[in-house]
Image (cartoon, rainbow, N blue to C red):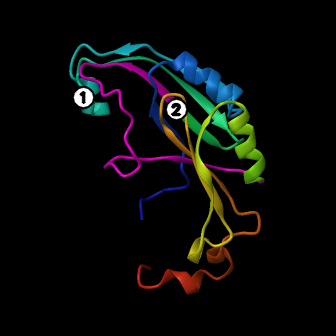
Amino acid sequence: MLPGLKRLDHIGFTVPHLESAHNWLIEVLGCEYMYELGPFAARDDWMHRHMNVDARTVMKRLRFYRCGGQAVFEVFEYDAPAQRQQPPHNSDIGGHHVALYVDDLDLAVAYLRERGVDVLGEPTTSGGASAGQRWIYFLSPWGMQFELVSYPHGKAFDHDPARFRGEHE
């Protein structure tokens, strides 16, 4: 186990235009703006050594948001040579999504659709260890994948963890 590990601290992601993302995170998701940092441009290879980006990359600015009272998003806007503009698919190496828990999935889906958010398909009901959960994906305006999940009575795993652990303990 990683010594001293307590919890997930934040989730960082990059957007093409911070101001547009700011508006969407606040107006659609209801996140709370916390603070802004930047710009930052190193004169040596600091960005490459510390951030694994091209050494000439400029972090134009970044903002922190609290979402749902707990999750913290660290949202970056960069100016970088050869920056890829296409978000990864969930199936790509490094692909990802951010899952947000909601009490009422149907109400949350209707809310997103009313605001023109690209909601992917219809809610899916999980089985197996995740029985009791429903979920659906949606896209941010910049193409990042988000997910809504809800399991108001817990998942099957929550009620009988030993049944689902199997050989991967």
- The structure residue drawn at horizontal position 63% and vertical position 29%, both measured from the top left corner, is 25
The quadrant the C terminus occupies is bottom left
Q: Position of residue 102 (x, y in %)?
A: 72, 51
* Left or right of 45 on screen, residue 156: right
- The structure residue drawn at horizontal position 24% and vertical position 13%, both measured from the top left corner, is 43
Q: Mark 2: give few (<14), some (14-19) or many (20+) Cα within 10 Å.
A: some
* Left or right of 57 on screen, residue 115: right
Residue 71 position (above or below residue 26): below
Is 84 covered by the magenta stretch? yes
Q: Position of residue 146 (x, y in %)?
A: 55, 43
Q: Position of residue 79 (x, y in %)?
A: 34, 16
Q: CA distance from mark 1 to mark 2?
A: 19 Å
Residue 60 position (above or below residue 12): above
Q: Nearer the viewer, residue 51 or 147?
A: 147
Q: Mark 1: give few (<14), some (14-19) or many (20+) Cα within 10 Å.
A: some
- The structure residue drawn at horizontal position 50% and vertical position 81%, both measured from the top left corner, is 165
Query: For numbered disc 2, what is the local secondary structure?
Result: strand
Residue range corresponding to the magenta coloring:
75-103
Residue 52 position (above or below residue 33): below
Residue occupied by mark 1: 48
Q: Nearer the viewer, residue 41 or 20?
A: 20
Q: Amino acid at mark 1?
A: His
* Left or right of 12 on screen, residue 131: right
Query: For numbered disc 1, what is the local secondary structure?
Result: helix
Residue occupied by mark 2: 74
- The structure residue drawn at horizontal position 48% and vertical position 18%, both measured from the top left corner, is 17
Is 77 covered by the magenta stretch? yes
Mark nearer the N terminus (1 vs 2): 1
Q: Which mark is residue 61?
A: none
Residue 2 position (above or below residue 29): below
Quadrant of the image occupied by residue 48: top left
**Prevailing SS of the magenta stretch:** loop
